[in-house]
């Protein structure tokens, strides 16, 4: 359902350039492929660069064409593009769901579930109906609190003349409409009306729920649920302040842009909210002026071309840049955040060394010994104050990921602007690195192991695992202050990193001072996805002087096993030598496992004494 778009012309498959690529073009492609609609039109080779010709460029569709070649474009093969501009789409088979209603309850929040099909209202049988199904019903109605099943026939049975439309309903919980859930098919059931199901909803925290449509999880057309119906918002007074409130209500840090002019399409909803005025500090949309006041609907302005949209800001995936201003070196200064086109300051309430640690790390500077400064120590800034009551744990990747009041919510003046002083490194590293771990518990900074990120062009990005091995991992570990490597990892072992992929085909000798000095493709050039992010586990383990060593291997983690006994190095015979024995050797040398045992002098014959024979380890020694 998603991928790079390719067309076949003259018997050859080729790509489409993303110039003028938009949701209308994506709709045509998705329908041509048999899907019902398009979720998103994507650019910049999101799904990888193609090969061969670029067949189409400057494609302009109305969205109603039956085939992409019926859209306007200059001609086959005429383009001024490169494959990094290859267009893609995300398709979906989602359609507008069938309406539902609750009947027989004492309030609008409860009742017998009825669903409309072919213009007729019918009931839903309670076979296999669970709280998950009830939640989908409640959320379709705009109630985002808890949902529970009603007791048997609490809200009565449907009329004998009514059909039972659905049976054996099985929702996953992520459906927008009950009709999207698995069921036996319209009108197919083995029920009677005494089995009609009912639900009880609670309104939840938000009196006016909002959702984003025709975009992605972070951007789209804004739709609000008011007085029992979903509606769009006219862009007459749409502003970044209102967009901030919508995004915060959706769980994001704030808004990157407030999009007027039906950027994400007009939709098919007939209900329109004529105007909204938010200061930007409201906890939810209902607190803004105009949301529930329909006395003014400027029909002469609001139409299909004036629907409001928003692009929300995800603090982890798209962190805003930071800078330090007013210091005597680049390692100190007033902390400023670039958001919505303006550099803004941070208030010093609760500001401490943990917050400073996160700032220094995000800037690619050493987080060790970071100092937090208050009371505009580096001078007062101008413009907005974007963060207040910042309370980092110190493990966050970005300042905006730390708990705070929310964007632009503060009670401060610029005499409270926060600053930091980062440690000046003893040796200058052009492109520092850090380790991160991204798993079910969230994204945080790793200590001695994690996915590698490297700092380039003021942005943290990852390293692809093509050619990634022990020597490159050794360089990385030394950069981080460790003496050795436990293991070089591939395939995003510690989780996928956010941001760009900066390096690919990294080949090190192991002697380089930093990864950027190793052989690699030009910065930012790669043929990888984040599933190939490289990682490492580092150690400060020092091999005892009288112990083991590996000799004759191609890398430091392979070779002939030699044992030091009575001051003399000798070898081990391979009789009964197996993986358990190899595991013990590798563990003793500071590695976390063995790939395979080696026999028959694979790494060359030793000299001198053969110290051990018929070794039989359990693997736990």
Image (tube, helix red, strand yellow):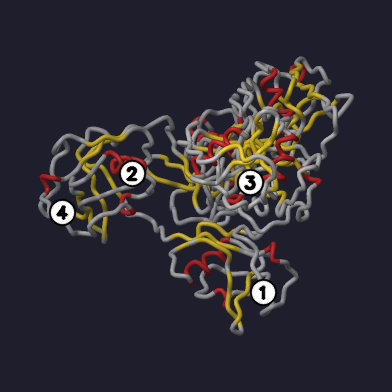
Which numbered mark, 4 or 3, is in the foreground of this view? 3
Mark 4 is surrounded, within 10 Å at the Cα level, by few (under 14), some (14 to 19) or many (20 or more) other residues, namely: few
Circle nearer the N terminus (1, 4): 1
Q: Residue at x 83, y 20 (%)?
A: 378
Residue 371, horizontal then vertical, whole percent: 75, 18
Label 1 vs label 4: CA separation? 59 Å
Circle nearer the N terminus (4, 3): 4
Residue designated by label 2: 136
Which numbered mark, 2 or 3, is in the foreground of this view? 3
Position above or below: 584 against 463: above
Position above or below: 428 against 196: above
Label 1 vs label 3: CA separation? 29 Å
Q: Are marks 2 and 3 in contact (CB under 8 Å)?
A: no
Image mark for residue 83: none
Mark 2 is surrounded, within 10 Å at the Cα level, by few (under 14), some (14 to 19) or many (20 or more) other residues, namely: many
Task: Name the one closer to the observer, 453 or 616.
Answer: 616
Residue 447, horizontal then vertical, whole percent: 63, 30
Residue designated by label 4: 162
Which numbered mark, 4 or 2, is in the foreground of this view? 2
Residue 42, horizontal then vertical, whole percent: 60, 58
Residue designated by label 1: 52
Left or right side of 3 for 53: right
Task: Name the one closer to the observer, 393 or 258.
Answer: 393
Q: Helix, strand, or loop for circle 3?
A: loop
Image mark for residue 534: 3
Residue 478 is drawn in which quadrant?
A: top right
Label 4 vs label 3: CA separation? 60 Å
Task: Name the one closer to the observer, 550 or 193.
Answer: 550
Circle nearer the N terminus (1, 3): 1
Circle nearer the N terminus (2, 3): 2
Q: Residue at x 53, y 69 (%)?
A: 29
């Amino acid at each position: 359902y998603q991928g790079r778009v390719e067309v076949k012309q003259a018997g050859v498959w080729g790509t489409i350039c993303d110039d003028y690529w938009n949701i209308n073009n994506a709709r045509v492609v998705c329908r041509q492929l048999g899907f019902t609609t398009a979720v998103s039109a994507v650019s910049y080779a999101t799904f990888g660069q193609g090969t061969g010709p670029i067949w189409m460029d400057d494609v302009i569709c109305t969205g109603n064409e039956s085939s992409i070649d019926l859209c306007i474009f200059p001609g086959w093969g005429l383009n001024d593009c490169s494959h990094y501009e290859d267009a893609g789409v995300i398709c979906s088979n989602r359609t507008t769901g069938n309406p539902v209603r609750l009947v027989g309850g004492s309030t609008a929040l409860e009742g017998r579930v009825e669903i409309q099909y072919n213009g007729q209202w019918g009931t839903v049988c309670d076979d296999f109906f669970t709280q998950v199904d009830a939640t989908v019903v409640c959320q379709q109605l705009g109630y985002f609190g808890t949902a529970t099943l009603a007791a048997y026939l609490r809200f009565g049975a449907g009329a004998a003349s009514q059909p039972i439309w659905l049976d054996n309903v099985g929702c996953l919980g992520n459906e927008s409409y009950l009709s999207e859930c698995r069921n036996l098919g319209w009108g197919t059931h083995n029920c009677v009306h005494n089995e009609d199901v009912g639900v009880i909803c609670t309104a939840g925290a938000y009196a006016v729920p909002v959702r984003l449509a025709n975009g992605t999880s972070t951007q789209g057309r804004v739709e609000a649920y008011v007085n029992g119906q979903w509606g769009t918002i006219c862009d007459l007074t749409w502003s970044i302040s209102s967009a901030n409130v919508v995004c915060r209500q959706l769980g994001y840090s704030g808004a990157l842009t407030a999009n007027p002019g039906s950027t994400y399409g007009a939709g098919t909803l007939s209900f329109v909210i004529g105007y909204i005025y938010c200061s930007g500090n409201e906890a939810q949309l209902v607190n803004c002026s105009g949301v529930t006041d329909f006395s003014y609907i400027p029909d002469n302005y609001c139409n299909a071309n004036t629907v409001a949209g928003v692009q929300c800001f995800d603090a982890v995936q798209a962190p805003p840049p930071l800078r330090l201003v007013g210091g005597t070196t680049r390692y100190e200064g007033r902390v400023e955040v670039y958001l919505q086109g303006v550099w803004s300051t941070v208030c010093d309430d609760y500001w401490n060394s943990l917050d400073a640690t996160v700032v220094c790390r995000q800037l690619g500077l050493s987080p060790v010994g970071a100092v937090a400064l208050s009371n505009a120590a580096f001078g007062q800034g101008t413009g907005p104050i974007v963060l207040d009551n910042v309370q980092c744990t110190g493990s966050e990747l970005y300042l905006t990921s730390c708990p705070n009041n929310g964007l632009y919510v503060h009670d401060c003046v610029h005499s409270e602007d926060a600053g930091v002083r980062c440690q000046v490194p003893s040796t200058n590293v052009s492109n520092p690195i850090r380790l991160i771990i991204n798993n079910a518990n969230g994204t945080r900074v790793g200590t001695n192991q994690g996915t590698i990120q490297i700092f380039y062009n003021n942005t943290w990005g990852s390293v692809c695992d093509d050619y990634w091995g022990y020597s490159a991992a050794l360089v990385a570990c030394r950069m981080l202050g460790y003496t050795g490597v436990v293991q070089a990892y591939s395939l995003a072992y510690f989780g996928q990193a956010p941001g760009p992929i900066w390096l690919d085909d990294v080949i090190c000798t192991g002697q380089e001072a930093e990864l950027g000095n190793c052989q690699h493709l030009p910065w930012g050039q790669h043929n990888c996805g984040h599933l190939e992010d490289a990682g490492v586990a580092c150690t400060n383990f020092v091999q005892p002087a009288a112990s083991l060593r590996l000799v004759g291997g191609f890398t430091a983690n392979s070779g002939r096993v030699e044992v030091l006994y009575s001051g003399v190095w000798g070898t081990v015979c391979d009789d009964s030598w197996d993986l358990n024995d190899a595991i013990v050797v590798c563990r003793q040398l500071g590695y976390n496992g063995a790939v395979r045992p080696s026999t028959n002098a694979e790494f060359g014959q030793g000299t001198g004494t053969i110290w051990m024979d018929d070794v039989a380890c359990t693997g736990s020694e």
